[in-house]
Amino acid sequence: MNVLVTGCAGLIGSAAVTLFDALGLRVVGVENNSRRTFFGPGGDISRNLDHLHKSCRNFTCEQVDIRDQPQMQRLFSSQQFDLVIHAAGQPSHEWSADHPAEDFQINAMGTLNILESCRVYCPEAVFIFTSTNKVYGDRPNRLPLRELATRWDFDGESFFFGIPETLSLDQSLHTPYGASKIAADIMVQEYARYYGLRAGVFRLGCVTGPRHTGVSNHGFLNHLVRIAMGGERYTIVGYGGKQVRDQLHASDLAAAMWAFAQHPNVGEVYNLGGGKENAASILEYIAIIESIANRRMEVSFSDTPRRGDHICYYSDLRKFRSHYPDWSVDYSVPSMIEQMMQASANS
């Protein structure tokens, strides 16, 4: 089996490459290290790419920008891919607000380039798109919520397991980033339903792991761990630190991709994250870090939340689990934090 992974040196892409290479598949990656452009030196993923070249036996990488349609057509026409993992993209709310046109070109038009190349040159391939929970905009903030001592949570039984795929995308504030990902998300579904492409959409919560290059405006838990290990002050933005996120290890996500690749449900959308059991507030993540590290963190607060930021979000995993019952969330929050601490200590 031949696999294409766009954004191959990012957190999600590198986890996918590592798994598929270990399974004995031939993997071609696409990468241009745009993360360094978005986030500066702290977002540089060159080390991840070097690691993949050294550790993977059946991996090659193409230095291609997904916006370059002729280059994408050249790549697809010269190879026969059986599986396409589209993990490349611009991931930041703040960056998209300052660069809305470029954000749309990357996330929406880049996705269209890949979809069209796949339709023309390998229409039988399985296609997986890494979308985001930000397609729901700030609608989760208008659900019934209750404030507890250290977190916000959903009030009542309707969202006990988290946010399902049926939540509306309309009539909410998304930021340009959320809007560009909606465009890509819907286009992937349309290529599945209209053209019959064997495509699925994964709407992701927070994905993390030791190979994450977390920065202040993306990759929050990895960034938080790095700040803690460096003894620096961390600034909590909005909601008193009680905002809740679920965390999914990139390796668990790669395993979900492999489950879908073997038995694709064409046109399906899945909310994927750590789920209720891996959900915590910023205050609670800090407490876990302090307990493992056995030292206090320096913390300050900023009262103004980021526009479109979720007060409480964790993924309802029941749909994916019902379709792929052998898949599981293997990494707990403490185990992920311990992994990232060890990686930070060794870097």
Image (cartoon, helix red, strand yellow):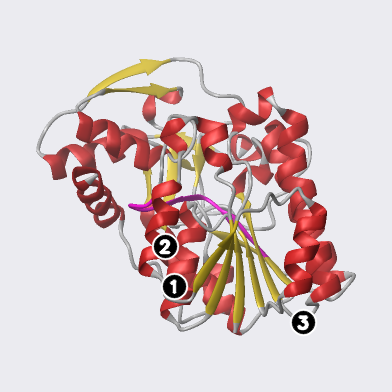
Q: Are marks 2 and 3 in contact (CB under 8 Å)?
A: no
- Decide: is 41 above or below 3: above
Residue drawn at (63%, 47%) of the image? 89
Q: Secondary structure at mark 3?
A: loop
Q: CA distance from mark 2 to mark 1?
A: 11 Å
Closest to the camera, between mark 2 and mark 3, is 2
Q: Earlier in the sequence, mark 2 or mark 3?
A: 2
Q: Relative to residue 161, is residue 201 drawn left or right?
A: right
Q: CA distance from mark 2 to mark 3?
A: 27 Å
- Decide: is 118 above or below 40: below
Q: Which residue is mark 2?
A: 52
Question: How crowded is the residue under tag 1: few (<14 C-alpha within 10 Å), some, or many (20+)?
Answer: some
Q: Relative to residue 67, is residue 247 drawn left or right?
A: left
Q: Amino acid at mark 3?
A: Glu
Q: Which residues are magenta?
A: 201-211
Q: Which secondary structure dominates the residues rendered in magenta? A: strand
Q: Which residue is mark 1?
A: 19
Closest to the camera, between mark 2 and mark 1, is 2
Q: Which mark, residue 151?
A: none
Q: Secondary structure at mark 2?
A: helix
Q: Are marks 2 and 1 in contact (CB under 8 Å)?
A: no
Q: Amino acid at mark 2?
A: Leu
Q: Amino acid at mark 1?
A: Leu
Q: Is residue 281 visible?
A: no
Q: CA distance from mark 1 to mark 3?
A: 22 Å
Q: Which mark, residue 124?
A: 3
Q: Nearer the viewer, residue 319 or 154?
A: 319
Q: Earlier in the sequence, mark 1 or mark 3?
A: 1
Residue 319: x %, y % from top left = 59, 69
